[in-house]
Image (cartoon, grey):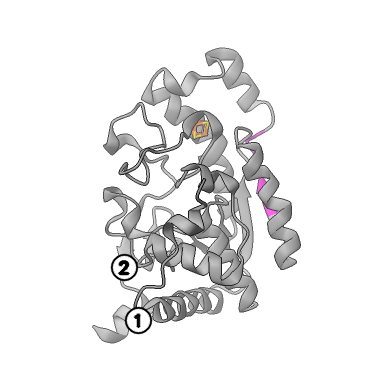
Amino acid sequence: MSTAIELYARARPGYEERVASAVAVLQAAAAAHPGRVVLTTSLGVEDMVLADLIARHRLPIALATLETGRLHAETLALIPRLEQRYGLQVERWLPQAGQALQFVREHGELAMRQSIELRKACCALRKLEPLARLLAGRSAWVTGLRREQSGARAEVAFESIDEQGRTKYSPLADWSQADVWHHVEQHDVPYNPLHDAFFPSIGCEPCTRAVALGEDFRAGRWWWEQEDAKECGLHASTSRPSPAQKENA
Ligand code: SF4
């Protein structure tokens, strides 16, 4: 079986410039929000690339992940690998004690498959509420969103403002899948082995499946829902130009 590196890594023109641009965005984030900026890592390959850039450039940006209670064993195993590789600590944010248990008691283990409302309720208690606590006291966050990932992400800006007024940075907004895997190959970045099993986007175990050849990047997430419903609410925002865009305006 081919690995994700063998399948996707390509040295494309402009890669070095895109790396430099991503580092510049991270440096700007760290400078503008000292001690108050965090990489919210899903432990997907884009976030591993960002962790690599943060560590490589010794940037004062915290790392945090949402441990939803429904992650794959492979995803959980990546946390200590990341910490050991880079000497960084990853904050783990869990659902409120008892809430997830109560939800499962009331609606069952696979409640998210019953209706969009129950799926969103599950995401709200396992992701959105812990994310709100994670971001409390912070003025900015960094994500691995890329425009190429889906139609809903086609307009992702390097810098935007979320609904709570925090600055949200997406340094890989203009990176391709080939760029991401080329960077992984070049720097031996640790990654989730599920990516080698055709899981391009990895969320919770009950809500993620492998994709078939030619399927969209996000096709394996909540695959029983309509395309336009398939975001969990973590990334609602209004965009504004990046520092570089402002200079060029
Ligand atoms: S992705 Fe699935 S299991 Fe995870 S929080 Fe959302 S509905 Fe629940």
Q: Quadrant of the C terminus?
A: bottom left
Q: Are marks 2 and 1 in contact (CB under 8 Å)?
A: no
The answer for how far apart the CA atoms under marks 2 and 1 are is: 11 Å
Above or below: residue 175 compared with residue 101:
below
Type of amino acid at the residue the image marks with label 1: Ala
Above or below: residue 77 compared with residue 178:
above
Viewer-nearest of discs 2 and 1: 1
Q: Nearer the viewer, residue 8 or 245?
A: 8
Q: Residues within 10 Å of mark 1 (few under 14, many from 20)?
A: few
In magenta segment, residue 93 = yes
Residue designated by label 1: 244
Quadrant hosting residue 215: top left
Residue 41 locus on image (x, y percent): 56, 54
Which residue: 54% across, 66% down? 185
Q: Residues within 10 Å of mark 2 (few under 14, many from 20)?
A: some
Residue 165 visible in rendering: no
User: Which label sits on residue 130?
Assistant: none
Residue 128 locus on image (x, y percent): 51, 41
User: Which label sits on residue 240?
Assistant: 2
Above or below: residue 136 compared with residue 29:
above
Type of amino acid at the residue the image marks with label 2: Arg
Residue 183 visible in rendering: yes
Tag 2 secondary structure: strand
Residue 92 locus on image (x, y percent): 68, 48
Q: Nearer the viewer, residue 8 or 158?
A: 8
Tag 1 secondary structure: helix
